[in-house]
Amino acid sequence: MGRRQVIDPRVRAEVIATYGNTCWLGLPGCTVVGEEDDHIVPHSHGGKATVANIRRACKHCNASRQDRVLYGYGARLHMIVCPPGCDAVALDYITEHSRSVDPVVAYSYLADAMGVAAHESRAERVAVGMAWSAAYRSFTTCAEPLDVWCVRSFPSSRRHPRMLDEWLALDYDIHVMDMDYAEAWDHAVTEDERVLVRRWYSLHLSQALVDARQAARRARLTALGLRSDAASVASRPEW
Ligand SMILES: [Zn+2]
């Protein structure tokens, strides 16, 4: 693989001396001790094997991350988490906070574009889910400085059971639509949808929880020299 280029041992030694040998990623399943040299800007995006662009990662995280970009080092992912069936509320939020040219990845939009009624049957929901995942996966490795807005109910999938932890590790912008249970319940039409709404609220997702975890992660990224400060988002540095 192209990513496995040889790193100058002096670069590695300086990275360890400056930023330590603890895995910088901390993705789900992290084994903590740095075993490999990870490119912050992926090698495939033109990232160099310099002290500025190398941090230590455990084998698991390096493989799990693949070429996904850290927020601001390529695409900026904004994850809008809302109760099932409440896409419209999330889309209102996006309209308020995005530029009109920003790409939006939402179930309702994808269903419309594919000519599928997302509420019709399980098979159709699966089809829309596949399109969502494909778009999401592509944008996570996008080198262009796009602001991408993704609407999702459950921050987990079969392949990524701890998606929220991955978003935090890669410093995505995360907004939880804290809606009244009663309001979300009203949006649920079928028994299937009601089951999903109940399941969503049982996760106890909240913006306060996300903010606390994000503050800790951002402090760590700042200490790693990957973020300018804990309050504002670093722009992509010039290597
Ligand atoms: Zn790790």
Image (cartoon, rainbow, N blue to C red):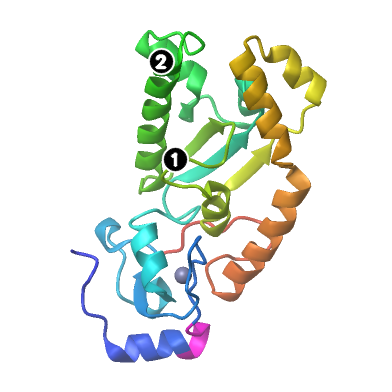
Label at residue 218: none
Given residues 113 and 228, the one toward you in this image is 113
Q: Which mark sits nearer the N-terminus, 2 or 1?
A: 2
Instruction: Please state the extent of the stretch shown in magenta in the rendering.
Output: 17-21
Q: CA distance from mark 2 to mark 1?
A: 29 Å
Location of residue 140 in the rendering, given as x and y in whole percent from the top left corner: 41, 46
**Can residue 88 be seen?**
no
Image quarter where the C terminus lies is bottom left
* Crowding at mark 1 (Cα within 10 Å: few <14, some 14-19, many 20+): some
Query: In the displayed structure, would residue 94 be above or below residue 5?
Result: above
Q: Residue at x 63, y 14 (%)?
A: 191
CB of mark 2 within 8 Å of CB of mark 1? Answer: no
Q: Secondary structure at mark 1?
A: loop
Q: Secondary structure at mark 2?
A: helix
Q: Would you say the magenta stretch is mainly helix, strand or loop?
A: helix
Label at residue 124: 2
Query: In the displayed structure, would residue 84 be above or below residue 34?
Result: above
The residue labelled by disc 1 is 146
Mark in the foreground, 2 or 1:
2
Residue 179 falls left or right of residue 77: right
Location of residue 108 in the rendering, given as x and y in whole percent from the top left corner: 51, 17
What's under tag 2, amino acid-wise? Glu
Q: Which corner quadrant of the image does residue 56 belong to?
A: bottom left
Q: Residue at x 43, y 19 (%)?
A: 110
Query: Farthest left residue?
Result: 1
Query: In the displayed structure, would residue 135 be above or below residue 143?
Result: above
Location of residue 26 in the rendering, given as x and y in whole percent from the top left corner: 52, 67
* Crowding at mark 2 (Cα within 10 Å: few <14, some 14-19, many 20+): some
Location of residue 171 in the rendering, given as x and y in whole percent from the top left corner: 56, 55
**Can residue 19 be seen?**
yes
Residue 167 falls left or right of residue 58: right
Given residues 227 and 216, the one toward you in this image is 216
